[in-house]
Image (tube, helix red, strand yellow):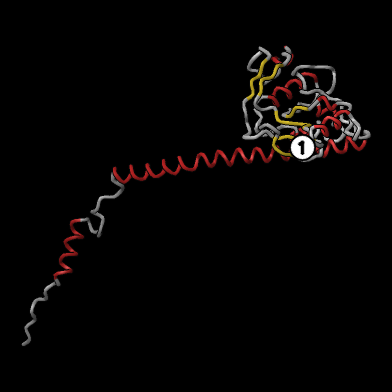
Amino acid sequence: MILRMPSRRPSHLWFVSRSLARSGGCVGCGRRGGFSLIELLVVISIIALLVGVLLPTLSAVRARAIGIACASNLRQIGLGFELYLMDHDQTFPRAEFMPEPFVPQSGQPAINQALDAYLPTSDKGSQRVYTCPGDDDIAPLVAAAAEARGDAPTGVSYYYQSRLSGRTLDADSRIMRRLNSMGMSEADLLVLSDFDGSEFVFKFDEDMAALPGNVFETTSGVVDVGFFHRNRNALYADGHVAYALGN
C-alpha cells in the first residue's frame, strides 16, 4: 500500500495567491495611479520654462517672415517700375506721396493706379503685392477709401517719393547731379518705402464711415502707425530692395 503525502504549495506561490486575493485578482492593481502634486508642479515648471525660452524666438521668426514677404512685394513692384520706365523714356510716374484718403492730395493718382497697366489693381495677386502683411493700419484705410470711390478695394502699404514724379535719372538730370555731388548713385535713391513708424493725416469722408465693416476707428483724421518691422524695407532706384537708410 502506497501512502501519498499531501503536497505542499511552494511558498512563493502562496505569496502570489495572497497578493492576488488582496488586489482583487490583479497583480499591481493595488498600487496608486497618477502623478503626485510635486511631480505635476515639476512638469508645469518645465513647460513654463520652455515656453519662456521659445516665445521670443518664435516672435523673431514671425517678424522675419513678415519682413521677407514685404521685401518680396517691393521687388515685384520694382519690376512694374522697370516696365513703366521702359515704356515712358525712363521717366518716373506722376503719383501721390500717399494714396487717398491721406494728404496732401494734389490730384495725382496713387502709385498703384499709376502702375495699373503693369500690376492691375483689379487682379487679386496685384492687390496683395501692394499690401505688407505687417500693415494693419494704412492698407485697410486706403482700401476702404478706394471702395468708397467705386474702385477696386486695393490697400497700399508703401509711400512713393513723389519728388521723382515726371523726372528722369539721366546723368545730367538735377537729381543725379545732386546725388553725384554727395558721392551717391541710383542705388542710394529711395523710391518706395514702408509706412511704419510715423503719424499720418487723412481726409475723413462720410461715405467711408457708411461702408459695411467700417475700418475707421477714428474720425479725427490722424493715424499713428507703429513700427511693424525691425527695419523698414525700401525699393531703390536701381531696382534692389534693402533696409531704408537711417532705419
Image x and y of residue 207, in percent? 74, 14
Left or right side of 135 for 54? left
Quadrant of the rendering where the C terminus is positioned: top right
Residue 143: name its quadrant.
top right
Image x and y of residue 81, in percent? 84, 35
The residue closer to the viewer here, 139 or 67, is: 67
The residue closer to the viewer here, 182 or 133, is: 182
The residue closer to the viewer here, 17 or 142, is: 142
Image x and y of residue 188, in percent? 77, 35
Left or right side of 173 for 110? left
Q: Amino acid at mark 1?
A: Gly
Left or right side of 44 for 101? right
Number of marks in the rendered image: 1
Quadrant of the rendering where the N terminus is positioned: bottom left
The residue under the point 88% across, 38% down is 83
The residue under the point 39% across, 45% down is 46
Image x and y of residue 12, in percent? 17, 69
Q: Is residue 226 above or below residue 171?
A: above
Residue 229: name its quadrant.
top right
Which residue in the structure is indicated by mark 1? 125
Label 1 residue SS: helix
10 Å crowding of disc 1: few (<14), some (14-19), many (20+): few
The residue under the point 68% across, 31% down is 246
